[in-house]
Image (cartoon, rainbow, N blue to C red):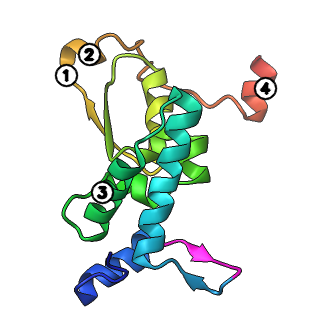
């Protein structure tokens, strides 16, 4: 089991992107603590939401493989595992996609982006033609004359 990443670059990326601050200890998580947080989260998540208990040997084998960088999980899930991912599962996704074919697509895009997930979108003619027509000219009526005329 490796508690350290092999290169300074990997250590920097881990500390700056994935390692949580531990206020009670006045430091950031080590690599093994970050990986442990990820596996603890999913062990609890699978039990609570799917009634599934991961075989301890399998869990240990997977955790060891991640620690040694033989395999890697979703890095977004590694970053957000814990309360953030429990609250909003979208925080575990790297990217999403939608067609701009309805006005609430813009709301959805904003929500997904605010969770840190990238969003690709399609603006093909057959999709955007489904949107309501927007007037070309807008008149600002919040003036004395505009209010008087209303």
The residue carrying mark 2 is 127
Across and down, in percent, residue 25 comes to: 66, 84
| Residue in front for this viewpoint, 146 or 133 | 133
Q: Which mark is residue 61?
A: 3
Which residue is drawn at the image coordinates 53% and 28% (left, top)? 51
Mark 3 touching mark 4, by CB under 8 A? no
The residue carrying mark 4 is 147
Across and down, in percent, residue 123 comes to: 24, 27
Q: Quadrant of the C terminus?
A: top right
Name the secondary structure under disc 2: helix
The residue carrying mark 1 is 124
Could you tell me if residue 114 is visible in this image?
A: no
Mark 3 touching mark 1, by CB under 8 A? no
Tell me how far mark 3 sits from mark 4, CA to CA.
71 Å
Sequence order check, earlier mark of 4 and 2: 2
Sequence order check, earlier mark of 3 and 1: 3
- Is 49 positioned to the left or the right of 105 in the image? right
Across and down, in percent, residue 130 comes to: 33, 10
Tell me how far mark 1 sits from mark 2, CA to CA.
5 Å
Tell me how far mark 3 sits from mark 1, CA to CA.
46 Å
Name the secondary structure under disc 1: loop
Sequence order check, earlier mark of 1 and 4: 1
| Residue in front for this viewpoint, 46 or 138 | 46
Q: Nearer the viewer, mark 1 or mark 4?
A: 1
Mark 1 touching mark 4, by CB under 8 A? no
Tell me how far mark 1 sits from mark 4, CA to CA.
40 Å
Tell me how far mark 4 sits from mark 2, CA to CA.
38 Å
Q: Which residues are magenta?
A: 19-24
Tell me how far mark 3 sits from mark 2, CA to CA.
46 Å
Indicate whether 55 appears above or below 144: below
Which residue is drawn at the image coordinates 37% and 43% (left, top)? 93
């Amino acid at each position: 089991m490796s508690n350290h990443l092999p290169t300074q670059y990997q250590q920097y990326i881990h500390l700056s992107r994935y390692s949580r601050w531990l206020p009670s200890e006045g430091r950031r998580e080590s690599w093994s603590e970050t990986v442990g947080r990820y596996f603890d989260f999913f062990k609890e998540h699978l039990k609570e939401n799917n009634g599934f208990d991961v075989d301890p040997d399998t869990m240990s084998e997977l955790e060891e493989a991640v620690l040694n960088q033989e395999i890697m999980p979703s890095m977004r899930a590694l970053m957000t595992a814990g309360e953030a991912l429990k609250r909003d599962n979208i925080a575990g996704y790297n990217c999403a996609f939608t067609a701009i074919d309805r006005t609430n697509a813009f709301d959805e895009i904003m929500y997904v982006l605010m969770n840190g997930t990238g969003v690709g979108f399609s603006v093909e003619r057959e999709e955007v033609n489904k949107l309501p027509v927007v007037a070309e000219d807008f008149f600002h009526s919040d003036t004395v004359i505009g209010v008087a005329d209303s």
